[in-house]
Amino acid sequence: LTASEEAGVVAGCAATVKWQLAIFYFFSGFWKINTSFLNPKYSCASIFTVQPLEYLPDSILFGWPSVKAVAQTIAAVGPAATLVIEAVLPLALHATDPTLIKVGVLAVATFHLVIAATPPPSNVSSFGVTTVTRLFFCMPRAWSVAVEAAAREPLLMLALAVAPALALAAVYDLHAVAPSTVQGTGQDYHLAYYAALCVLAGRACAGPPSKCAPAAEEKKASRWHVGAALFYAMALPILGLQVKGGCLMFSQLKMHGGSNHLLLPTSLLQRGLVDAAPDNAFAGGVVRINSYSLAWVGSPFAEHMGPRTIRVIRDLAGVPGEYVWAAKQTTRDRAAPPPRPFAYTISNLGLRRLLATARSQGEALDVYYERLAGAVGDETWRTATPGTAYRVRLAADGSVSCGTGAFYLSSCGDRELALLAPPSQPSRALAFMLLPQPNPIVPGMTDEMHCVTWG
């Protein structure tokens, strides 16, 4: 492509990309307007916003009383502060004044830098890489100038080499203690790449105002693509067609058993079809899994935080809630971090998938569960109210036996057996993006959902 053709491509899609990014940011914050995220004792924000204090030496971190007061203040205001930040960022993406565009780009880059540099297991540097690269469309000429300058400005070349090295050095000791739930173990090269992107963002914003304006002759946004982004971010959670891979990461939004959101319902299909034909993927409501014989089922509930992080969160900040990385569930045995056998609730489709996974791996599985009455209830209903108890035994050859109660008092009825079988193809096709995630039951902490993350 010629330079003019490339400029035409950018002008044609810039508005659409900016609208989509703004929608994703907005709903990432909007879905956090729920009772669990806003409760500092349970909120993901209360955990994550305190973790940067881990960069302090122990003599200060645990020796100065003022640090404890700061940690508790951060934990208390963290949920509300997160909502404010994620509400402001979409506005920054649509500024037209060059100065405001610079401020917006630097604000977004800084926000993701804090996330990327957060100590494990909460660092998500790849999130910043995939998001900040799209800031190119806010001021494409300024970014182009910055990239071109990287080949001819010695100081910029030096900064692009030094910033990644300094970023890796800064987090090295913390990463050696605990693995990242997203980036894994070892060096976080996404962080190194992101540090270089931040240098380029700074160079782009250092240019003259004329270079920081939006794309020349920017075309109107595509209604179809913006509408698709809105459907993805808003409608799918309301209907209950997506949990993992949506705009729900760290939101603690209830996606089965009713909604904890202060404004909107969730998973309406699972509510409306709870008593539908048993071969429907959305039938069956909610089940409470009390015990299971395969250890890997408890892998989402493994303790990912290291001892020092736990001390900061529990003793300094006073946050008792658990941090559960449900998105990293494995279907194989894992020694580190070891699974924890928490009971949990999940939609009936999740129970079906559990049995199907064990069957496909040729593993025997013994599950004791309760099917809760209805499809909606409070946390007492979810965690403690008795349901109809069943025990299912899946043999290694794939055969299934099912009985009522914990000790097979009688055989399961036809409907219960059908609710355990794979769903029919039409409803399965509708639920093809739906990967149900477990909500743990933590003894003594059952007022709200814990920090369960999907992504």
Image (cartoon, grey):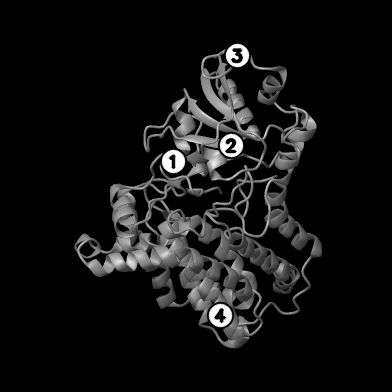
Pick whichever of labels 3 and 2 is earlier in the sequence: 2
User: As shown in the figure, which amino acid type bears the numbered disc 3?
Assistant: Ser
**Residue indicated by mark 4:** 102
Residue 264 on image: x %, y %: 68, 56
Residue 364 on image: x %, y %: 52, 17
- When the figure is inspected, residue 310 is found, relative to residue 388, above or below; the finding is below
Q: CA distance from mark 3 to mark 4?
A: 63 Å
Q: Which mark is residue 139?
A: none
Tell which tag, 4 or 1, sits nearer the viewer: 1
Q: CA distance from mark 3 to mark 2?
A: 21 Å
Q: Quadrant of residue 33?
A: bottom right
One can see residue 2 in this view = no
Say whether residue 64 is left or right of residue 166.
left
Within 10 Å of disc 2 (Cα), the crowding (few <14, some 14-19, many 20+) is many
**Residue indicated by mark 2:** 346
Within 10 Å of disc 3 (Cα), the crowding (few <14, some 14-19, many 20+) is some
Q: Secondary structure at mark 1?
A: loop
